[in-house]
Amino acid sequence: MAVLSTLTPEQATARRARREGRRRILRHMALLAWTGFIVFPVYWMVMTSFKDSGEWVTWPPNWFPRDPTLLNYSQIFAFAHLDASQARQATEQSFTIWKGLGDAVLVCTTASFAALLLGTFLAYSISRFNVGGKYFRHTILTIRMIPPIVIAISILMYYAIIIPYVTSALFGFRLKLFDTYIGLILIYTVTTLPFVIWMMLTFIDEVPYTLEHAARMMGAGRMTVIWKIVLPLVASGMVVTFLFVFILNWAEFLLALTLTHPEVTTLTVLLNKFQSASEGRLYGPQAAIGTMITIPVVILGMLIQNHLVKGFSFGTIRK
Amino acid sequence: MARIQIKDLVKTFGAYNAVSGINMEIKDGEFMIMVGPSGCGKTTTLNMISGLETPTSGHIIIGNTVVNDLEPGERGLGMVFQDLALFPHMTVYENIAFGLRIKKEPRAEIDRRVTAAAEALHIKSLLPKLPRQCSGGESQRVALARTIVTNPAVFLMDEPLSSLDAKLRVDMRTELKRLHERLKATFVYVTHDQAEAMTMADSIVVMSKGKIEQLGTPLAIYNAPATQFVAGFFGTPTMNFLEGIVEANGRGRRFKAPGIDQPLPDSLPTGIAGKKITLGVRSEHVLVDASAPHAGTVLITEPLGDTTLVHFEYGQGKTLVAKVPPTTTLGPGAMLNFHFAPQACHLFDAAGGARLN
Ligand SMILES: Nc1ncnc2c1ncn2[C@@H]1O[C@H](COP(=O)(O)OP(=O)(O)OP(=O)(O)O)[C@@H](O)[C@H]1O
Ligand SMILES: [Mg+2]
C-alpha cells in the first residue's frame, strides 16, 4: 500500500495553486496559437487591401503596407468609369462592388425572410401538431448533411434545362430560373429552411401551450393566437434565426457560382471574378472586397451573440 | 342559464381510456369540484367541457345547447389554468383586457371593466406591471381577474391553487368561495386535494381511472362513501380498513377478523353471512376505552395539538389509528383497549369495494 507523504493544508494549497497555474499557462498558450492560426488570414486580407500592386506579392512579405493606399477601395467603390489616375492599365475590366453588393443584399434578404416566414410556421405545426411524425424534426436536419456539391449539378440541370423545357412544353412559356434572382432566392430559401425550422422549434417549444389554450378560451382564433401570443414570445428567436440564415446566404459561394452567370452576381462570386488577363489575380481589390464582405458578418455575429444570450436566458417565459 | 350536462363522455388517447363514459349534471350556480388521484382524467374531462379537447364520444350540453362542435371561445366559459398561463409579454392590464379586445369592445368599456375587475381582486396597483414582476399570490389574482372580466356563466378551474404555498392556498380558498357567492356563476373546479374539495364544494365528483366513483355533497361523501376508494380518499388520517368475514349466529351478525369481533348493525342486506368484507372505520370512531373488548399495544403517538393520533397494533401485527384527546397519557409500548362506534362502521365488499350498508 502506498503511503501518502504528509502534507499540511498550506502545502496542499500551494501545490494545487502551482498545478493550476501551470495548467492555465498551457491552456492559454494553446488558445493563443489557435487564435493566431484563425486570425492570420483575416489580418493578411485587411493588410493587403491597403497595399498597392507592387506590394501584393513580395518576398520577404511586408507585414504592414509600406506605402498605405486607399486605391483598392476607391476602385471597388467607384461609381463611374475610373479616371486615369485610378485605372490601372491592367484593369481593363473595371469591376466595382455595387452590382455584387446590390444582388447579394437583395437575394440574401429576400431568401432569409422567405425562409424565416415559412420555417416559423412549419416549426409551429411540427411543435404543436407533430406534423410529419415523431422523428420529423431530426429528419429535417439530416437534409442539411448533404453537401451542396452533391445537389449543385442536379439543380443546375433542373434550372437550365428541365424546368424551362417542361414549362414551355406544358404552359407555353419558359420558366427561367438559371441566372435569375428568383432562381437563386428559391434555392437559398430551400437550403436554409431546415436551419430555420430547427432553430425556431427550440424557441416555439419553449412557449407553454397553456398560453395558447388561455387565449383560445377567451375567443381568439388560431391566427390571432399565433400573431398575438406565439410570435411576440419568439420574436428575439426570430431575429437570431434571421441573422444566422442571412450570414449563411451571404457567405454562400458554390450554388451562386453554379447557378448564375453572367447576369446575377453575388459578392462571393464577384470576388472570384476579380482578375485581369495581364496581371492575373488583383489581390488588392479582392482583399478590399473581402474586407467589406466580412464587416457585416462580424457585426451580425456580435448582434446574434447578444440576442442569443437574450433569447435563452432573458426569462421572458416564466415556468 | 348555465347548467352543464355530460352524457356518456368518453375520451381515448390511442388505445388508452382517459375518460371512460361519465354522466353527470352540474346545476346552475353550483360550486362543483372534481377530485381524484393523479391521472384519473380530471383535466381531460375539464378540457372537453372547455372545448380544448374533442370528446371521442358522448355529449356536453351547456344550457340547452350541445356544445361539442363549438370552439372554446364560443361556449361562454372562463378558465383558470394550473400554471395560470398569464401572457408574459403583456402587462397585467393587457392580460386582463385580452379577452375584451378579442371581442372588440370599445376602448372606454374595456378600461372600465378592467379597472372594475382589478378593484374586485385588489390588484389595481399591479396593472402596469409585467406578470414576472408579480408574486405567486398576485399572479393568481391576475389570472382570476382575467377570467371574471369577460363575465362567463361558467368558470372552469384546473388546480388553480397548486402553485401556491400552503398558507396562501388556504386564504385563496376562502376568497374563491366568496367570489363564487358574489358572481353566482357555475364553478367547475379540479383538484386532487381532498381537503380543498371538502371545504369549498357544494357537490363533489370523485373520479378514479376515468370513471365517476361517487357524486354528492361533501358531507354525504364523507359520511357515506359509496366505495372503499372514496372512503380511503377523504379524511386525514386515512380511514382504517380491516379485512374479515361475516359470521351469523343466534345473536345476529358479527364481523370477525384476527383480534376483532365486532357486532354489525341489523340494517345490512341479507345473504352476506360467510362473505369476505372490508370494514372501514375513521380514526375518530376508534374509541379507546378501558372496558372495551379488544386489546392493542401503542406503537407511536402523533400529537397534532387539538387531538393526538395513536398508532397501535392489535392481533397479528395489524395496525390501526385512533384519534384521542390531546390530554392522553398513552405512550409507545402502552397497552390499550378499544372498540368501534357501531354506527360509524363502513362495510365494503372485499372483492369489488362497493358499499354494503
Ligand atoms: N394528450 C394526451 N395523450 C396521451 N395521453 C394523455 C394525453 N393527455 C392525458 N393523457 C393521459 O390521460 C390520463 C388522464 O390525464 P389527465 O390529465 O386528465 O389526468 P388528471 O386527472 O388531470 O391528473 P393530474 O391530477 O395529474 O393533473 C393520464 O393517464 C394521461 O397520461
Ligand atoms: Mg390535471
Image: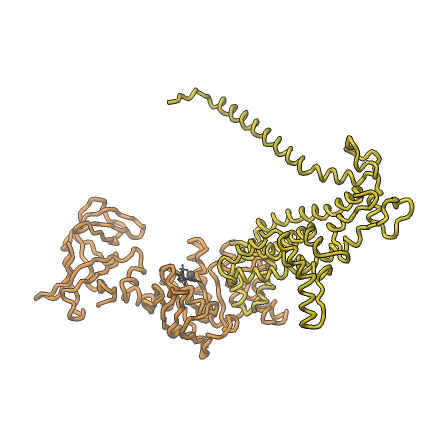
Chain colours: A yellow, B orange
Q: Is residue A52 above or below residue A253?
A: above
In the rendered image, the residue lying farthest to the top is: A5
Q: Residue at x 85, y 43 (%)?
A: A71
Direction from residue B197 to residue A96 in the image, left or right:
right
Residue B321 visible in the snapshot = yes
- B273 horizontally vs A190: left or right: left
Q: Nearer the viewer, residue A222 or A131?
A: A131
Which residue is located at x 47 percent, y 23 percent? A9
Quadrant assignment, res B114: bottom right
For the N terminus of chain A, give its image quadrant. top left
Which residue reaches farthest left?
A: B250
- In the picture provided, is B268 more to the left or to the right than B132? left
Q: Where in the figure is residue B26, as x and y percent of width and height?
A: 40, 72
Please indicate, yes or no, whether residue B120 appears anywhere in the rendered image: no
| Closest to the observer, A269 or B97 | A269
Q: Quadrant of residue A49?
A: top right
Q: Position of residue B330 (x, y in %)?
A: 22, 47
Locate residue B343, reporting x and y percent.
21, 64
Outermost right residue: A84
Q: Position of residue B197 (x, y in %)?
A: 37, 63
- Up/down of A150 relative to B112, above or below: above
Ligand 1's quadrant is bottom left
Residue closest to the eye, B120 or A145: A145
